[in-house]
Image (cartoon, grey):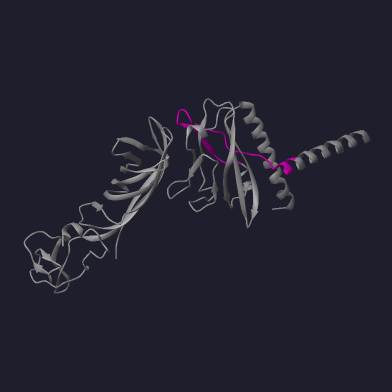
Amino acid sequence: MDYQNTRGICGSDGMPTPYGPDCTDHGANCSPYDDGATVEESTGYTCQEVEADVWQCVSTRSCVDYHMEGGGKFLNEGGVSFVRADVSGRTGVNGDGQICDYDGILATIETFNHASNALANTVELDKVVFTDLGGGDFGAQCDGTAMVNGGGPVDITIDASKSGGVVSFTLDDIDTPQNLAGATGETGRADLSFSTTQAP
Amino acid sequence: MSKRMHIMRPRLGLLLALVALATSAATAAPNVTFTTTPIGVGLFEYDLTLNDVGGPEPLSGLDILDANSVFGLTSGSTIGAPAGWSYFAPAPLVNELDYFSLSGASDIAVGASLGGFSFVSSTDPASIGFTFAVEAIGGTSSTQIPLPNAVYMPEPSTGLLLASALAALGVARRRSARRG
């Protein structure tokens, strides 16, 4: 099993249990699928002391629940876009500040661009990458599909961020390419938030 | 609050609304008028009309700016839009109810009006002085157009009642003057 790539699917059947099996080679790479046997290559699992004198082959990652929400009025040279966005899920993180997920992403996103009369909704995401910058600031990049004015699905990419109180959100058609909605959030009338909580 | 105050407040609100309506009509600018209907259990249906009076361009959007904080509207609220229009309800971190025309064909032409914007709220219109903040979106420019606060239009029966009361008051004064 390619658990190096699948360990991000926290809470799913493919995720090894958070504890065990026991291991003996303290600190070494190990395989939770092979009774904690020591392996040479990096697996994402190491032999760690989970309590006093108890060593187990456990993930170097922890699972978090992430959540981005918000929207409002976004302005660009072409005019006004309305945005509503809610993206959440559970994935594994390794403490480098990035949160990536590719499976089981819950997304409710809808946008309307007044300049083009483009209504995008029924969004399904197959990739999200969040970068938590601290102090409420973050960056997000998402890929997936959306229905546009009832047609599609079309391949889309979303870039969202919040930095120093300034929020931005763009939803682009990858194939055309075309900006379907968004730009810079209007001060006081657009906001996005991103949060994580440690998953049980 | 005394019984008299209860009676006075709606009348004052109506008078203010009528003055505001007259002012709005005089300036001939796009505006929003609304009526309310008590529908029981403390709820009111708000019915809005967007009037593109003397505007520079067709209108393709209507925003109720404090839809969540003033009216308590959320994605679970009862909200209606005219044919050819849709809306985004308020959401976490988003206070506004945003209506939008789905195509140029359903934009409101200059000089025309469109009703059918509605929502149900527990907010008594008297408690907000029979007015609230709104904004439009230009159909050509796709940019925001500031509007005066929405203006309350009394129901026809209420208007007739008010007119009758004013007429009766006039007659009474005339009789009083003759006696004097």
Does residue B97 appear anywhere in the picture? no
On-image quarter of the C terminus of chain B? top right
In the rendered image, the residue lying farthest to the front is A151
In the rendered image, the residue lying farthest to the left is A40
Q: Is residue B98 magenta?
A: no
Does residue A98 appear anywhere in the picture? yes
Q: Which residue is drawn at 21% across and 66% down?
A: A16
Q: Position of residue A151 (x, y in %)?
A: 39, 42
**In the rendered image, the vertical position of residue B7 relative to residue B29, given as above or below:** below
**In the rendered image, the vertical position of residue B37 relative to residue A20, given as above or below:** above
**In this rendering, position of residue B76 left or right of residue B20:** left
The total of numbered circles placed on residues is 0
**In this rendering, position of residue B106 left or right of residue A27:** right
In the rendered image, the residue lying farthest to the right is B179
Q: Which residue is drawn at 71% across and 50% down?
A: B6
**In this rendering, position of residue A101 left or right of residue B43:** left
**In the rendered image, the vertical position of residue A187 relative to residue A63, given as above or below:** above
Tell me the quarter of the picture where residue A62 sits.
bottom left
Tell me the quarter of the picture where residue B51 sits.
top right
Q: Where is residue B154 in the image (x, y as percent from the top left)?
A: 68, 41
Q: Where is residue A77 in the image (x, y as percent from the top left)?
A: 38, 29
Q: Does the magenta stretch include residue B149?
A: yes
Pick the front one: A13 or B30? A13
Pick the front one: B164 or A117? A117
Q: Position of residue A90 (x, y in %)?
A: 29, 58
Please state the extent of the stretch shown in magenta in the rendering: B131-159
